[in-house]
Image (tube, rainbow, N blue to C red):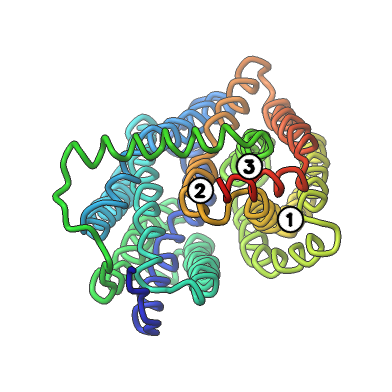
Amino acid sequence: MEKMPAYDTKKVISWALYDWGNSAFATTVMAGFFPVFFKQYWSAGSSAVESTFRLGAANSIASLVIVIAAPILGAIADRGSAKKRFLLFFAFLGILMTGGLYFVSQGNWLLAAGLYVFGTIGFSGGNVFYDSLLVSVAGPKKVDFVSALGFSLGYLGGGLLFAFNILMTQKPHLFGLANAAEAVRWSYITVALWWAVFSLPIMLYVDEVNEKQERLTLKAVTEGFQQLAHTFAEISRLKTVVLFLLGYWLYIDALDTIVRMAVDYGLAIGFKPAGLMIALLITQFVGFPAAIAFGKLGEKLGPKTGILIGIGIYILITIWAYFMREQREFYILAVGIGLIQGGVQSLSRSLYARIIPHNKSAEFFGFYNMLGKFAAVIGPLLMGWVGVISGDSRLGILSLVILFLAGGALLLQVNVEEGMRMARELEKS
């Protein structure tokens, strides 16, 4: 029987601080400054719909690379004592690419997009190994708390640095900078340093426990694909799980697309960058406590109903975004997204937990996490493509309603009670 890791506060905090550090990339770079700078600085002279398509393509390429690589990364994470080494590799890749954005000259959108793609691969790839180290710092009784701690520190750490970066752009002279453009370029350096500094604790104080000591060879990769095939075969026996995962892929893809492309859309329809950054901060700080409240709603009405309510609200938000004309409406939109974003994600996880075999939860959640982490492949391309074809960015964001409707329609077909019954039967087989 494997020995469960003892609860060690120092190791737990060291693990959670990585989320505090790398979340700066998600907020300042992915959601915040990169879409603005990409459109106004690196794509200077291009039309709004053209730059939106380029950004959407960059997001989709990065997501697709990670989706394809995920089984291999999972094999490495499950075999051999190499989690920290590969976490270091991907973190270093993300940090280096983020810092490199400082040096990209105006108009060089292709280099900026390339650095962004590799930075996103570093961010997402690192999260595979970061997540896998959770079992090294928390036993079954503490895993929920420790996981939530990382989640909450990510919101807080990413939000705090983002707030500081916004101050840099609004008052550049306080920091000895010439203008807002120079402040944005320096913000990429601050993200790289923030990410690097808060990656040190996990490297220094978190040990890999109960690891198989085999060398990392082609055999490990082959076994990883075999494990994925086995999990897929198990999932295919459960119609309810298949329906849910297909629906989840579609609506979470649309949700993630809104998160990544909201600022670009705001710029495309003429809103000022400073106001869009404030809206992002609103979403960041509203999101975490709202997720808890939305979870209570799910407890009373059931997770499926709660998710459907969230999808319905997202559809209304997307339609409203199509008609927006004033910047203050974007602030209200930010509050609305913040109120339901975390809730939909949380209830999706709890519903999934109900309809899978409990004795195979690790491999089933591995598949679920792969879908969730590496979503936003279809949405950005759809949004960018519709915008280019129609010449209207508003129609681009409206196209996401298709994904929400399709995801919701599949979710409606999910019979939770039947799914629970089939999962229990599979447990016994």
**Front residue (pair 169, 256):** 256
With 344 as the anchor, is 308 left or right in this view?
right
- Nearer-N-terminus badge (3/2): 3
Q: Is residue 132 above or below residue 7?
A: above
Question: Decide: marks 1, 3 in contact (CB < 8 A)?
Answer: no
| Label 1, residues with CA under 10 Å away: few <14, some 14-19, many ≥20 | many
- Nearer-N-terminus badge (2/1): 1
Q: Position of residue 341 (x, y in %)?
A: 68, 54
Q: Specify the amino acid type for callout 3.
A: Ile
Q: Specify the amino acid type for callout 2.
A: Asn
Residue at (66%, 59%) from the top-left corner? Answer: 283
**Front residue (pair 37, 421):** 421
Q: Is residue 423 above or below residue 46?
A: below
Residue at (47%, 39%) from the top-left corner? Answer: 231
Q: Which residue is mark 1?
A: 340
Q: Which residue is mark 2?
A: 369
Q: Position of residue 236 (x, y in %)?
A: 57, 32
